[in-house]
């Protein structure tokens, strides 16, 4: 199953199956396989003692304790647009301020991935007839400002901790969307977003362990 899943994932990426306008049979098979694999597709980058199945169980329990899921596409897209602006802000800071090659590489990767994901967001928003104003939320603006004031000595640690916190929160948020949404386009987008977020988080955790 793992081999078949990996080949399908590679095929879909190479042929840009993840674009919002493409929902063919391969994407549907991929979504089915993602459920069977219990989100274990990034386990090689995580602690070997933590399985995708364990992650799925924990996330499912966390979701069960929350209020009923009510889907508001326009609100979701507006919130994510603000979150994208936030991610671009903190990662541009890291590119400018950090002297650690691994931090800079991670920041560039996150920036690139979010810019690409932003294209998906705008495409989906257009299909839903939703107008988005790219506004940085007040609380996120303060986070960017606080990070910008950090000196060279503490910057890398503060940056990595912020990336880890924000990505953990985003994974919880997008997992719930993936689990609850009835919209096939949004389910596919949430799957892709979870993949991206887990990759970022795994690399941030690895870098944090190497920082002194």
Image (spheres, rainbow, N blue to C red):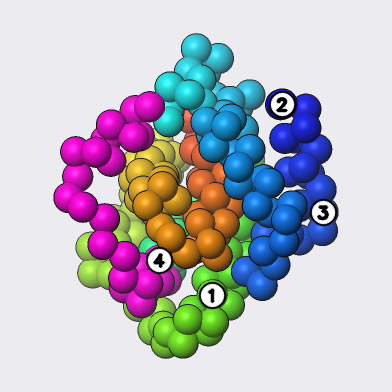
Q: Do labels 1 and 2 touch, CB within 8 Å? A: no
Give the CA separation, mark 3 to mark 4.
Answer: 26 Å
Q: Earlier in the sequence, mark 2 or mark 4?
A: 2
Residue at image mark 4: 80
Q: In this view, does 72 lie above or below 114?
A: below
Q: Do labels 2 and 4 touch, CB within 8 Å? A: no
Residue at image mark 2: 1
Residue at point 57% right, 57% down? 188
- Measured as percent of width and height from the top left, residue 35 is found at 54, 37
Residue at point 23% right, 69% down? 138
- Measured as percent of width and height from the top left, residue 180 is found at 37, 52
* Left or right of residue 145: residue 14: right
Q: Do labels 1 and 3 touch, CB within 8 Å? A: no
Q: Earlier in the sequence, mark 4 or mark 1?
A: 4
Q: Viewer-proximal residue, 195 or 36?
A: 36
Q: Which of marks 3 and 4 is nearer the N terminus?
A: 3
Residue at image mark 3: 14
Q: Give the range drawn in magenta.
A: 57-82
Q: Do labels 4 and 1 touch, CB within 8 Å? A: no
Q: Crowding at label 4, few (<14), some or many (≥20) Cα neighbours within 10 Å?
A: some
Q: Do labels 3 and 4 touch, CB within 8 Å? A: no
Q: Which of marks 1 and 3 is nearer the N terminus?
A: 3
Question: Closer to the observer: label 1 or label 2?
Answer: 2
């Amino acid at each position: 199953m793992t081999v078949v899943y990996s080949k399908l994932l590679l095929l879909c990426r190479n042929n840009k199956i993840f674009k919002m306008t493409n929902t063919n049979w391969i994407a549907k098979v991929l979504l089915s396989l993602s459920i069977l694999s219990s989100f274990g597709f990034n386990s090689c980058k995580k602690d070997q003692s933590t399985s995708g199945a364990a992650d799925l169980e924990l996330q499912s329990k966390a979701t069960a304790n929350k209020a009923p899921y009510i889907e508001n596409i326009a609100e979701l897209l507006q919130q994510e647009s603000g979150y994208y602006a936030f991610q671009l802000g903190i990662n541009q800071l890291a590119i400018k301020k950090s002297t650690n090659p691994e931090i800079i590489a991670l920041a560039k990767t996150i920036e690139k991935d979010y810019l690409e994901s932003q294209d998906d967001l705008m495409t989906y928003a257009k299909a839903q007839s939703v107008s988005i104003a790219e506004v940085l939320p007040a609380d996120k603006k303060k986070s960017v400002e606080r990070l910008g004031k950090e000196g060279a000595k503490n910057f890398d640690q503060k940056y990595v901790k912020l990336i880890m916190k924000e990505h953990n929160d985003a994974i919880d948020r997008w997992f719930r969307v993936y689990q609850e949404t009835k919209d096939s386009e949004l389910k596919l987008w949430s799957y892709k977003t979870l993949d991206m977020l887990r990759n970022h988080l795994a690399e941030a955790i690895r870098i944090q362990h190497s920082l002194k």
